[in-house]
Amino acid sequence: MKKTLISLALAALSSHVWAGNLQVVVLDKDGKPVADAVVVVVPVNKGAPKAALPSQVTITQEKMRFVPAVSVVAVGAKASFVNNDPWEHHVRASAAGLAQFSTANTGGFELRIDGKPEGRPARSAEGVFEKAGAVLLGCHIHGSMRGHVYVSDSPWAILTGADGIANIEQIPDGAAQIKVWHADQLIDIVPQQTTVSAVAGKVTMQLNVVPRRRRV
């Protein structure tokens, strides 16, 4: 009986995937911190993230901007677009990066949202992000409006802060790939390989561009 319990315990330990933490620092071409870069970690081993990616997100159209400018969601996430401006807006969602220039791109969706009536609730419309990848948000009427949604099929995905740092927790130990995406980087930078362990790791990745200053 004792041997059986020991065997079961050893089997449980051998099948357990320990989790580690990873800090990713994203810099621009000039070596300065980059905010709102998407960091995605794809571990070889399976495991459960500390928190699931959002399956629902609210994006407002306000002062001729999409707010937030960048969102990270799970595949299949539903988005509620709310027009807080008094004039009509559209939402055009299509592939971002070089794919946005492809005439063969048939993914995404289009919505029309009336302006907010004075003294009444704002109008809204919903869309679904069905495919993984970066999505460009635009408006047919106001060409200067730009926003982005990164749809991740890995739950270990997060935006960098103003300091260019993304802290990803509870990643399964072992080999993992790190990908970084930014709206101004049309050609993705080469992913980096790393090994996650119980000792917290740190990786620095650098863009090939200096991001444009966002309008406030």
Image (cartoon, rainbow, N blue to C red):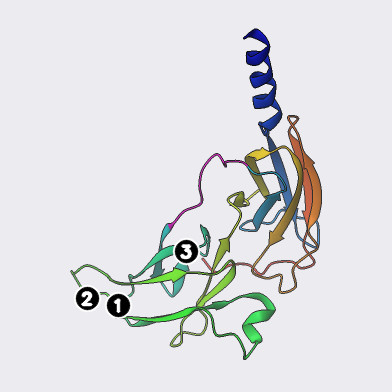
Q: Which mark is residue 76?
A: 3
Q: Which three-letter amino acid code belongs to the residue tagged 3?
A: Gly
Q: CA distance from mark 2 to mark 3?
A: 31 Å
Magenta segment: does it hold 48? yes
Residue 55 appears in the picture as rendered: yes
Q: CA distance from mark 3 to mark 1?
A: 30 Å
Mark 1 highlights which residue? 86
Give SS at disc 2.
Answer: loop
Classified by dominant secondary structure, the portion drawn in magenta counts as loop
Q: Nearer the viewer, mark 3 or mark 1?
A: 3
Q: CA distance from mark 2 to mark 1?
A: 6 Å
Mark 2 highlights which residue? 117
Give the left or right position of residue 86, taking residue 161 as reference: left
User: Would you place residue 24 above or below residue 134 in this image?
Assistant: above
Question: x%, y% of residue 165?
Answer: 67, 47
Question: x%, y% of residue 106?
Answer: 55, 85
Q: Nearer the viewer, mark 2 or mark 3?
A: 3
Q: Are there few (<14), some (14-19), or many (20+) residues within 10 Å of tag 1?
A: some
Residue 62 appears in the picture as rendered: no
Q: Nearer the viewer, residue 16 or 169?
A: 16
Give the left or right position of residue 45, taking residue 112 as reference: right
Q: Which three-letter amino acid code belongs to the residue tagged 1?
A: Pro
Q: Which residues are magenta?
A: 47-55
Question: x%, y% of residue 16?
Answer: 66, 31
Q: Nearer the viewer, residue 44 or 79?
A: 44
Q: Which three-letter amino acid code belongs to the residue tagged 2?
A: Pro
Give SS at disc 3.
Answer: loop
Q: Mark 2–mark 1 contact, CB under 8 Å?
A: yes
